[in-house]
Structure formats: structure tokens, C-alpha cells
Image (cartoon, grey):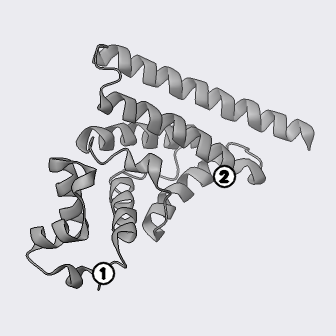
């Protein structure tokens, strides 16, 4: 069902994803879908999960910054594969257990970086918004006049800045403690 919803969004845009259109694509009645999701909101939550679980989870033995970098690079790949539905990641929070597992991986890396546990959710929100915003801008056409090489360099610079902010914030948190 989620695969069909994602395929619809990829082909016709996110607005095309309705209970009726997914049911039609699956050759079932819309009521049959309600055995799997409670409605369109849960369907969209499932699409968020589907996008996030396309990210390959980095090996836990990598350093925190290497894991975050790998996830950030992976999110750009997801954006390129699903440009029409990708903005959903900026509109809906991770709500399903699998989507929360991905966010949990980010939380763990931030904790290992020394981010104060009380600041981890906020730090994750800010970092994720910066990375998702870049990826949405890239696939949405905002950066269309720029070369792929320039964008790759810009993305690497964004990651450097975010890494520096994490380290500086962690150092400040420890100094306050």
C-alpha cells in the first residue's frame, strides 16, 4: 500500500495521494485500506516512514559525525529519487516506530557528540531542518542554475558548519555545567 502511495506521489505529485487513488491503484475498495491505516493522515505518516527508511543506517561503530554525514548524504539521495513527495518530510513529523528509529539514530549521534541530553531534540530539529531544506531546495528547482559540483560543495560546507555548531554547542553546554 505504501509503495503504491509513494509511486502515485512520484508520478503525479503528493496531492494525488488519496485513499481512493491508492485503492484504485491496488484494485481494492478504499474500505480495504482502512484495515492497514486509519485514514489519510496515517497514510502520509507511512510515506514519511517509507522515505526515512530508504536511508541506509550507518554502522554504529563509525564516529558520530561520520554517521550524521552519511545520513545527510543519504537524505539527498532520497530527495532525488522522490522529489514530488520529499517535501512531506518538512510538513509531517516522524510518527511511526520505524521513522522514530531513524530519528533515534540522530539522537544517539548527538549524545555521543556531547550535546546536553535536554538539548538533543532541539539540536536534531535544527539540523534536520537545515538538511531537509537544502535537499528540498535542490530538488524543487531553487538551485537549478547552479552546477552539481557547486551544490555538492555547498552541501559539504553546510555539513561543516553544522558539525562546528554541534561541537561548539557541546563545549558551551559542558562549560555551563
Q: Nearer the viewer, residue 146 or 76?
A: 146
Q: Residues within 10 Å of mark 1 (few under 14, many from 20)?
A: few
Mark 2 to mark 1 CA distance (whole Å): 30 Å
Q: Nearer the viewer, residue 59 or 148?
A: 148
| Quadrant for the N terminus in the image | bottom left
Q: Residue at image x 26%, y 53%? A: 15
Residue 90 percent location from the top left of the image: 46, 46
Q: For the residues carrying marks 2 and 1, which lies nearer the camera in this image?
A: 1
Q: Nearer the viewer, residue 105 or 14?
A: 14
Q: Residue at image x 50%, y 43%? A: 67
Q: Residue at image x 26%, y 44%? A: 84
Element carrying mark 2: helix
- Residue at the left extreme, as displayed: 27
- Using residue 148 as the reference point, say whether residue 92 is left or right of it: right
Quarter of image, res 165? top right
Residue 9 percent location from the top left of the image: 22, 52
Residue 148 percent location from the top left of the image: 29, 19
Residue 111 seen in the current view: no
Quarter of image, res 147? top left
The residue under label 1 is: 36
Q: Residue at image x 43%, y 40%? A: 70
Q: Which mark is residue 168?
A: none
In terms of sequence position, does the residue under pointer 2 or pointer 1 come before the other?
Answer: 1
Element carrying mark 1: loop
The residue under label 2 is: 121
Quarter of image, res 135? top left
Residue 164 percent location from the top left of the image: 65, 27
Q: Is residue 104 above or below residue 153?
A: below
Q: Residues within 10 Å of mark 2 (few under 14, many from 20)?
A: some
Amino acid at each position: 500500500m505504501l509503495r503504491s502511495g509513494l509511486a502515485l506521489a512520484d508520478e503525479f505529485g503528493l496531492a494525488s495521494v488519496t485513499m481512493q487513488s491508492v485503492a484504485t491503484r491496488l484494485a481494492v475498495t478504499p474500505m480495504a485500506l482502512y484495515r492497514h491505516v486509519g485514514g489519510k493522515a496515517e497514510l502520509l505518516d507511512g510515506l514519511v516512514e517509507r522515505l526515512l527508511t530508504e536511508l541506509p543506517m550507518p554502522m554504529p561503530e563509525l564516529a558520530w559525525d561520520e554517521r550524521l554525514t552519511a545520513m545527510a548524504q543519504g537524505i539527498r539521495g532520497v530527495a532525488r529519487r522522490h522529489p514530488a513527495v520529499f517535501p512531506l518530510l518538512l510538513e509531517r513529523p516522524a510518527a511511526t516506530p520505524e521513522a522514530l528509529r531513524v530519528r533515534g539514530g540522530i539522537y544517539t549521534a548527538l549524545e555521543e557528540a556531547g550535546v546536553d541530553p535536554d538539548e538533543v531534540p532541539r539540536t536534531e530539529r535544527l539540523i534536520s531542518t537545515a538538511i531537509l531544506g537544502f535537499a528540498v531546495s535542490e530538488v524543487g528547482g531553487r538551485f537549478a542554475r547552479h552546477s552539481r559540483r557547486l551544490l555538492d560543495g555547498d552541501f559539504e560546507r553546510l555539513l561543516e558548519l553544522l558539525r562546528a555548531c554541534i561541537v561548539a554547542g557541546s563545549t558551551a553546554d559542558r562549560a555551563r555545567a
